[in-house]
Image: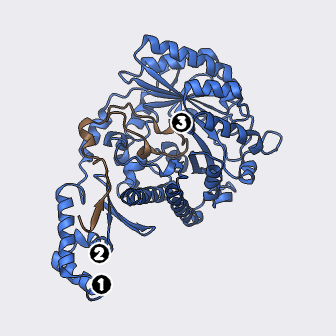
Amino acid sequence: MVHQYKNNGYNIVLDVNSGCVHVVDELTYDIVALFQTTDKEDITKQMLSKYEKDSVTQQEIEEVIKEIEELKEAGNLFSEDIYKDYIFDVKKRQTVVKALCLHIAHDCNLKCRYCFAEEGEYKGHRELMSYEVGKKALDFLIENSGNRRNLEVDFFGGEPLMNFDVVKQLVVYGRELEKHHDKKFRFTLTTNGVLLNDDIMEFANKEMANVVLSIDGRKEVHDYMRPTRNNKGSYELIMPKFQKLAESRNQNNYYVRGTFTHHNLDFSKDVLHLADLGFKQISVEPVVSQPEEPYAITEEDIATICEEYDTLAKEMIQRKKEGRDFNFFHFMIDLTGGPCVAKRLSGCGSGTEYLAVTPWGDFYPCHQFVGNEEFIMGNVFDGMNRTDIIDCFKQCNVYSKPKCQDCFAKYYCSGGCAANSYNFHGNINDAYDIGCELQRKRVECALMIKAAENDMVSE
Amino acid sequence: MKHIKTLNTRNLKESMKKGGCGECQTSCQSACKTSCTVGNQSCENK
């Protein structure tokens, strides 16, 4: 499968199955489109009639065809999908648990309008995770992680800093476990920043491999969607602290992470606002919500959002040239050292490698399923008792989703988010269509940025 | 090549030989929590 598109003056040809990205001239772009369905004589005839006399010669057309044939021969263009059989091994695999999302607090000191956790309570009641439950969760992770060495634990909520003592105790406990088992914990923290202080920053810088700092961008955008419990804006409260924390981490191993909605479709301004304030690691993502919400992103918004991604991509290239570059999480693609195909086929690992743990110790396939009790898979005291749910998630992959078959982005999103699929279609083997459209656009922008960066190196 | 410039990429097929160790980061532990962003994770088994 080949996907070809034009963006920002670049003609890009993506060979989906090999992952190879080719930047081509106009003539080649046209010939690639015909190559698999048209014989050489016809291609030549069509090209000679399409291009003005003397602008393209028969010799050039032959050169292009030869180059395409060489790439095809090398398996870098029009390559076959050889993963369909490989997926059987992926499905048979013995899964281990290697990542937990610990819901340290089902409580929050903000009341963000779009919160999928419903102000931290996840359709349930307010509760903080006890040290005992957290300990049991870490023990479970050690016991069920097989020979995986790197284990990940995200302190999530609600707002985890509302239960920070337990976070600290669990980190100490985790470091003890590391000494007795050949394991390495990577702790991460997702926070709204309200309770952030110097002591917590110091602790985070020592112990947290990554911190995710929730902020939406411009003050008016942020304050509207992320008010405090008494309806005040939270921007002024958190921004200086986030700037301080980002600097103290040398602008690495953190993300300022925002959500854009129907109310700020000009979200590139929010991204650039954060960049202008000095942040180098930025993620601003589309809200996912039921369509009846006033802030929901609708199909009518897609075109505007795609233009906005283009605007952002161009600005990022410009800033890179000027030495003012920053990372935008959704445009990050690691072409040379990215994930292997096994990872790309099997997806995010929800329900198998990755589980969420509620404050009282129930396991769910991921944080987004929490509160939907039919997905409770067991608990930290008795272990897993729903192998049917594990099997269901284990079977979920790029090939189990009909919508992914002809999609060029399938090896970048790995079939998309299971929870989004479930929330919109009632099963995990479908896909959230608006999300797919936006994902495809982001992949196109990300590859175009790579092409532009390649030019910068050659210049 | 004169007409085609190929960006430096890791051929996915090559990654079948040594892939699947499972040590790489879980995508939802990095920054997202609402989308699936496997493509931008890094391989830990280079």
Q: Secondary structure at mark 1?
A: loop
In the picture shown, does residue A236 fall above or below A433?
Answer: above
Residue A289: image x %, image y %?
A: 61, 50
Instruction: Tell which of A410 and A444 is nearer to you.
Output: A444
Point out the tag, 3 or 1, that comes first from the N-terminus: 1
Residue A174: image x %, image y %?
A: 52, 17
Point out the tag, 3 or 2, that comes first from the N-terminus: 2
Q: Is residue A290 visible in this depiction of the protein?
A: no
Asked if residue A49 lies left or right of residue A11, the reply is: left
Determine the residue positioned at 50% across, 30% down: A355
> What hue represents chain A?
blue
Q: Are marks 3 and 1 on the same chain?
A: yes
Residue A107: image x %, image y %?
A: 71, 31
Asked if residue A322 lies left or right of residue A347, the reply is: right
Determine the residue positioned at 66% across, 48% down: A277
Which residue is disc 3 drawn over?
Answer: A253
Which residue is disc 1 drawn over?
Answer: A51
**C-alpha separation, residue under disc 3 versus residue under disc 1:** 50 Å
Q: Chain of mark 1?
A: A
Q: Chain of mark 3?
A: A
Which residue is disc 2 drawn over?
Answer: A27
Tag 2: amino acid: Leu
Determine the residue positioned at 62% across, 37% down: A247
Crowd class of label 3 (few under 14; some 14 to 19; many from 20; radius 10 Å)? some
